[in-house]
Amino acid sequence: MKAKTVLITGISRGIGKELTSSFSKNGWNICGCYKNNSPDYTVPNSKFTKVDISKHNEVKELIKSSISEFGKIDCVINNASVAKRATIFRMTNEMWEHVIKTNLNGTFYIIKEALRTMIKQRSGSIINIASISAFKSYVGAAGYSASKSGVISLTRTAAREAGRFGITVNAVLPGFHFTSMGDNAGDAYIEEVKRKSVLNATTDIKELADFILFLAGVKTVSGQIFNFDSRIA
């Protein structure tokens, strides 16, 4: 059986790096992209490309080169994300636009171009990494929360539009985990996360990657938002 191919954005570290490892160990071809920091690792049957997903032309070229390398794309994982913390009255227009262009526009461009090839295949899976911030308010997170709320709505609309072609579109809220972004959280926030968790624990990133790997193969579930967390408000 020919190996399946997954396209993962934001592969340099954190969730993206863990997803790359998990999918690769399970025999998938990997098309990965990063914006600034080249990955400090390699995996078999992979193609890593420097791409700014906030630029539509670069996304189109990424999809084209990925198909040229491996023949098709079976799954897309929109993982790349940025955050600029500032209260609304201190947030510059540049900070706001950078977050929206990367987190929301970039996800839209990837979905748009991936669907062009998946519709021809009459199959495919798209998984968007969202955030609990889409549903909760946090001081200093206006841009990030707005972008992730947009990703949730985009997921549901894309699922409805793509379903008749046999394509699934879902989103995952990864919960709090220790990555380069999570490491910047203070001890007080981490303790609050644990206190609200029924397990008094943070998310296990390896379990998260395994769940996303499983979801990539599910054919009869779409338009859903999976909260991979154990916090209760």
Image: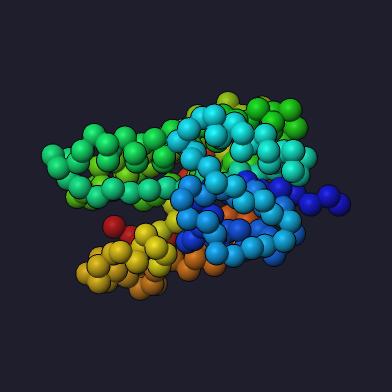
Q: Quadrant of the C terminus?
A: bottom left
Q: Residue at x 69, y 54 (%)?
A: 46
Specify the quadrant of the image occupied by residue 95.
top left
Q: Is residue 174 above or below residue 179?
A: above
How far from the left and from the top, in percent, is residue 156?
49, 34
* Image coordinates for residue 123, horizontal then vertical, percent: 72, 36
Residue 190 in which image quadrant: bottom left
Q: Is residue 107 left or right of residue 216?
A: left
Image spot of residue 133 (x, y percent): 33, 48
In the image, what residue occupies the spot 48% across and 32% down? Answer: 55
Q: Is residue 158 visible?
A: no
Task: Please indicate whether residue 16 sits to the left or right of residue 47 in the image.
Answer: left
- Of residues 121 and 9, the one drawn nearer to the viewer in this rendering: 9
Q: Is residue 76 visible?
A: yes
Horizontal arrangement in the rendering, residue 100 relative to residue 34 (left or right): left
| Quarter of the rendering containing residue 207 | bottom right
- Asked if residue 23 is positioned above or below residue 128 in the image, the reply reads below
**Residue at left 48%, top 47%?**
35
Residue in view at x 38 percent, y 42 percent: 148
**x, y (%) of residue 94?**
27, 36
